[in-house]
Image: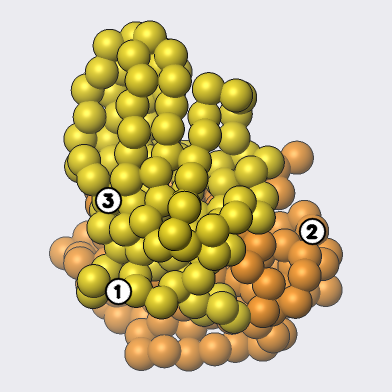
Chain colours: A orange, B yellow
Amino acid sequence: QKEVEQNSGPLSVPEGAIASLNCTYSDRGSQSFFWYRQYSGKSPELIMSIYSNGDKEDGRFTAQLNKASQYVSLLIRDSQPSDSATYLCAVNSGGSSGSARQLTFGSGTQLTVLP
Amino acid sequence: GAGVSQTPSNKVTEKGKYVELRCDPISGHTALYWYRQSLGQGPEFLIYFQGTGAADDSGLPNDRFFAVRPEGSVSTLKIQRTERGDSAVYLCASTPLPPRGYTFGSGTRLTVV
């Protein structure tokens, strides 16, 4: 079983809709959770971080964390064609939120926003 | 610098040759990480440094891979006797401590022919 799992997609949504991206992880000791956006041929770019249960909103993005279910999601409201990219879920397993331990990445979900 | 800088951006080498990939992190970032990413996959951890020392090298696939960070800033990933399976994008990232998420460099695309 992979440590961080994502639906590879592709996920297609119409412009203006809400895109919902999901991620599950296996290590119950995980403390920090991140969403990265990666455009084709480019490096990953951090868009959201979340450390405690509940929702965290930043502009059109909302990250949701449920540690009991080992589940983290990313909602993108009012999706735009420029949001079309691969979204990577990353988990810092073990240690405190201050630990420099490495992140474990999922394989990513490819999102296409149709104009 | 303003961001994480990686050189070269592209490297084509023949099977069996030695290569060095360079990473210049954001100034003041204590932690530095090397990942590699194959097509359609997420980044795969190789090694990370806190300061000058390798804090965790458990992701290095075999003893052909080695990395250094002698002065706690620039890091070099070294691959000996390259194989075609080493072809991938090698990503470097850095973060201050406590970490607030990585900042990745633009990567080095390594192609072994």
Chain where mark 2 sits: A
Q: Nearer the viewer, mark 1 or mark 2?
A: 2
Q: Secondary structure at mark 1?
A: loop
Relative image position of residue B89 (x, y in whole percent)? 35, 38
Mark 1 sits on what residue? Answer: A79
Q: Which residue is mark 3?
A: B6
Cα distance between the residues tagged 2 and 3 = 32 Å
Q: Are marks 1 and 2 on the same chain?
A: yes
At mark 2, the secondary structure is loop
The answer to whether A15 is drawn above or below residue A58 in the figure is above
Give coordinates of residue B88: x percent, y percent. 37, 31
Measure how far apart labels 3 and 1 are at the Cα level. Answer: 32 Å
- Residue A3 visible: yes
Is B60 located above or below residue B103 in the figure?
above
The residue type indicated by label 3 comes to Gln
Q: What subunit carries mark 3?
A: B
**Secondary structure found at label 3:** strand
The residue type indicated by label 1 comes to Ser
Q: Residue at x 57, y 47 (%)?
A: B47
**In percent of the image, x 33 and y 26: which residue is there?**
B19
Distance from disc 1 to disc 2, alpha carbons, whole Å, reads 31 Å
Disc 2 target residue: A27
**Where B55 falls versus A14 (above or below)?**
above
Q: In the rendered structure, the residue with mark 1 lies on which chain?
A: A
Task: Report whether B14 appears left or right of B54.
Answer: left
Q: Give the percent coordinates (x, y) of residue A39.
A: 27, 55
